[in-house]
Image (tube, rainbow, N blue to C red):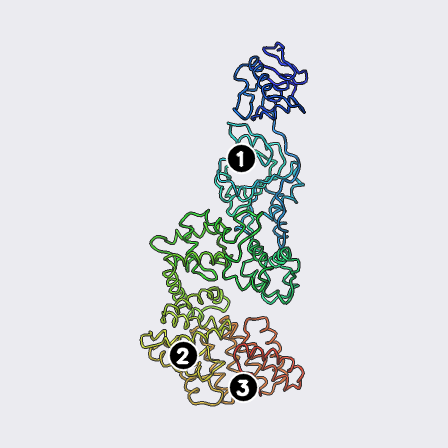
């Protein structure tokens, strides 16, 4: 309590219980003095009648008119305007103080943090990074999509970092704030600061915080960024002892801001056992929340497959995992996994204590989308047509129109990325992707509008155009570069095929099936290729352009080469005929080389096809293409029993495969060389080559080649007298033969 209060010509001295007016003592009774002191000490607010009665007559029951009598006496001494009456409520002291405003009290050194609702699982590296940034920088913004766990991580960082700040931590929650003019006042309230009314709240806040050593955490700021940035900039300039940690879906974009973008929790690969899966953050969080909902729940090898599927399909998003885990007691893990196609109905009914935007998965997305301009919301919705991501060029081909040119699209993608609704790979060129959950929402919104069919048709057309270059690129590029270009579009290819087939667009289906053959071949997706060939063969008719038909038949040859050789030969003959009619030298060469290798015994047609192919070949052709001629030479020589000539051709093929960066072809050639060593009676060399090749193939993505190599090694081991070693490989070889529709090999 101060020694005295000054109000113009009035001075009140509490310790002496004295009232001075113009320096002279005024006659004032004890009750009136107590009443005046109560009003003066609470002059920043209205004081109710009951409060005043308790102040002046503690423990006594008195009539209210006693209060009115003393108020009247004070007004006679101080003036009629000194005490205002608020009818029915109470009184307020109104004389202006002559004292300088008292410095606001420092907040107590305590952690003013929200209750801990979730443990921090799978975020050790991010926590360490965040703490390191807070040690070195005045402003750190934790960025990520809604439900990614920004608040949980910020809370743990604040608890750890708070000890380093003498004035502790203050937590400011902005999610429920809609008026940006109230930001400074909300921060002051969190700090228990009294800002002067009628003045500049931001200036007063900076003044109050200037002497403090404080960590100020501002949570859920994305909807107030422009005005918040002004306040943060002022704090950075005027409060050297304050560290700021902001959580937002979008950075503030201030100079000196350090942005830590929070990604999804780690998800294990399919096939992991329970012990291995539990080491990943997504599984650990799902398990912890499922156990909280049902103490009987445990992660086991019998349910881990379903748990991994849930974590993968929910993109490792903590909010989605928590909502899914809450459904486990009712549906079981398998039941939750089976219903993920309807995830927005499944993942509802979150904790009542959670903010409304975190009580359903749909609400979290809608909160994020509401922050976007209308044009960007439209682009987000249209991006639902892409499956598995997309490049800028592919997005331009599908989305760009008179209303949205390429530059507008680039700006929209930048905004979506900044708002954490779109991820961008580190590749060059970059690849964009919606999470599976975001895509499901976008596609649902798109399907309810009028643009869906048009966009799906444009998507199929864009994929057809994209894959048209696949076969020619395959000749010129290494496997690594070619797969880096085409493999990421596998899901888009499947979506385009499905849509074109559903729309009865046979020409697009035929074009895609033909041009996608190298990709299916490289990824050993022979079953998928055969299914599409079975489905699309009836779509070939007289109206099909010959180049498309020729490419389709060539692809059919590949699809059936290992499971149905006669069918593959018939397809090769159809392609051979069409390429000859078209005068396509390269296509004709490829089919002649393919036909030459389709017989396992001496054959005049095979010999004629080989000779014609080699006559067409030019030395400046790509190495991959010329390797086909050497492969055909090796196949014909082997069929004719000329094993040494076959090996010479295989070795020449191997050199060309390596020069082309044709890894799959290299492995095939090595497999044939191991088999030829056995056929030539070089058993030890065959075993040595076979073991090295199998070890190499097990680390590669060539299961069909591995299957052939295993059978070759089995035969070599038997010839070497190692029946036990051969028998040990039989289960693996037989399983691969079944998986890929390849007959088991016997000798």
* Viewer-nearest of discs 1 and 3: 1
Q: Nearer the viewer, residue 517 or 318?
A: 318
Q: Position of residue 144 (x, y in %)?
A: 53, 50
Q: Earlier in the sequence, mark 1 or mark 2?
A: 1
Kindly state the secondary structure of the residue where label 3 is placed.
helix
Q: Position of residue 208 (x, y in %)?
A: 59, 31
- The residue most toward the top is 24
Q: Earlier in the sequence, mark 1 or mark 3?
A: 1
Mark 3: few, some, or many residues within 10 Å (few <14, many ≥20)? some
Instruction: Please give the label number shown on residue 593.
Output: none
The answer to which quarter of the image holds residue 406 is bottom left
Left or right: 377 with respect to 747?
Answer: left
Residue 711 sits above or below residue 47 on the image: below
* Viewer-nearest of discs 1 and 2: 1
Mark 1 highlights which residue? Answer: 184
Mark 3 highlights which residue? Answer: 644
Q: CA distance from mark 1 to mark 2?
A: 76 Å
Residue 88 sits above or below residue 646 on the image: above
Mark 1: few, some, or many residues within 10 Å (few <14, many ≥20)? many
Would you say the residues marked 1 and 3 are in contact, meaning their CB atoms lie under 8 Å apart?
A: no
Mark 2 highlights which residue? Answer: 589
Is residue 432 in view from this perspective? Answer: no
Kindly state the secondary structure of the residue where label 2 is placed.
helix
Q: Nearer the viewer, residue 472 or 264?
A: 264
Q: Nearer the viewer, residue 606 or 33?
A: 33
- The residue most toward the left is 543
* Viewer-nearest of discs 2 and 3: 2
Q: Earlier in the sequence, mark 2 or mark 3?
A: 2
């Amino acid at each position: 309590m101060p020694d005295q209060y000054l109000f113009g010509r009035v001075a009140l001295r509490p310790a002496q219980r004295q009232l001075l007016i113009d320096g002279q003592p005024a006659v004032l009774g004890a009750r009136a003095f107590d009443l005046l002191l109560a009003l003066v000490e609470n002059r920043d607010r209205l004081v109710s009648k009951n409060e005043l009665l308790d102040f002046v007559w503690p423990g006594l029951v008195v009539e209210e008119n006693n209060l009115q009598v003393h108020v009247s006496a004070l007004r006679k001494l101080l003036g009629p305007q000194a005490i205002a009456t608020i009818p029915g409520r109470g009184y307020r002291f109104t004389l202006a103080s002559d004292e300088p405003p008292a410095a606001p009290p420092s907040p107590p050194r305590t952690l003013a943090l929200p209750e801990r609702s979730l443990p921090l699982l799978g975020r050790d590296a991010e926590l360490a990074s965040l703490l390191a940034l807070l040690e070195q920088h005045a402003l750190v913004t934790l960025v990520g999509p809604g439900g990614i766990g920004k608040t949980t991580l910020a809370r743990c960082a604040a608890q750890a970092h708070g000890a380093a700040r003498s004035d502790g931590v203050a937590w400011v929650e902005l999610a429920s704030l809609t008026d940006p003019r109230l930001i400074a006042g909300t921060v002051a309230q969190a700090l228990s600061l009294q800002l002067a009314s009628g003045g500049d709240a931001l200036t007063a806040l900076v003044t109050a915080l200037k002497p403090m050593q404080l960590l100020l955490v501002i949570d859920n700021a994305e909807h107030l960024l422009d005005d918040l940035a002004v306040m943060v900039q002022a704090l950075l300039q005027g409060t050297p002892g304050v560290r700021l940690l902001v959580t937002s879906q979008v950075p503030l974009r201030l100079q000196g801001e350090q942005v830590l973008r929070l990604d999804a929790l780690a998800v294990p690969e399919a096939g992991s056992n329970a012990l291995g899966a539990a080491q990943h953050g997504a599984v650990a969080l799902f398990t912890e929340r499922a156990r909280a909902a049902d103490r009987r729940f445990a992660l086991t090898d019998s349910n881990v497959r379903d748990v991994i599927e849930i974590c993968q399909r929910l993109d490792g998003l903590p909010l989605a995992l928590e909502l899914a885990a809450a459904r486990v007691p009712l549906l079981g893990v398998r039941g939750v996994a089976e219903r993920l196609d309807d995830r927005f109905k499944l993942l509802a009914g979150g904790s009542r204590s959670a903010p409304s935007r975190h009580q359903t998965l749909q609400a979290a997305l809608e909160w994020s989308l509401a922050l976007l301009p209308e044009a960007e919301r439209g682009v987000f919705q249209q991006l639902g047509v892409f499956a598995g991501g997309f490049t800028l060029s592919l997005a331009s081909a599908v989305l760009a129109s008179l209303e949205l040119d390429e530059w507008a699209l680039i700006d929209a993608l930048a905004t979506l990325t900044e708002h954490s609704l779109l991820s961008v790979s580190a590749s060059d060129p970059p690849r964009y992707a919606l999470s599976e959950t975001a895509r499901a929402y976008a596609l649902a919104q798109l399907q309810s509008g009028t643009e869906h069919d048009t966009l799906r048709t444009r998507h199929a057309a864009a994929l057809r155009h994209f894959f048209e270059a696949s076969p020619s690129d395959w000749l010129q590029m290494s496997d690594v570069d070619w797969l880096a270009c085409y493999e990421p579009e596998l899901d888009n290819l499947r979506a385009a095929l499905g849509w074109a087939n559903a729309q009865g667009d046979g020409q697009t289906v035929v074009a895609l099936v033909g041009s996608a053959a190298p990709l299916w071949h490289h990824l050993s997706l022979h079953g998928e290729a055969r299914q599409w060939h079975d489905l699309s063969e009836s779509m070939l008719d007289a109206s099909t352009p010959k180049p498309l038909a020729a490419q389709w038949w060539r692809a059919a040859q590949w699809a059936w080469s290992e499971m149905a050789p006669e069918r593959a030969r018939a397809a090769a003959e159809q392609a051979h005929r069409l390429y000859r009619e078209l005068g396509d030298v390269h296509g004709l060469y490829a089919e002649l080389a393919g036909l030459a290798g389709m017989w396992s015994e001496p054959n005049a047609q095979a010999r004629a096809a080989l000779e014609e192919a080699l006559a067409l070949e030019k030395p400046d052709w790509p190495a991959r293409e010329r390797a086909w001629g050497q492969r055909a030479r090796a196949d014909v020589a082997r069929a004719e029993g000329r094993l040494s000539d076959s090996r010479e051709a295989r070795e020449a093929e191997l050199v060309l495969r390596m020069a082309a960066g044709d890894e799959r072809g290299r492995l095939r050639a090595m497999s044939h060389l191991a088999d030829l060593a056995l056929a030539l009676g070089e058993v030890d060399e065959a075993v040595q080559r076979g073991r090295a090749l199998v070890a190499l193939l097990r680390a590669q993505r060539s299961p069909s080649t591995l299957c052939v190599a295993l059978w070759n090694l089995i035969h070599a081991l038997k010839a070497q007298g190692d029946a036990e070693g051969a028998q040990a490989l039989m289960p693996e070889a037989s399983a691969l033969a079944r998986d890929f529709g390849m007959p088991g090999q016997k000798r």
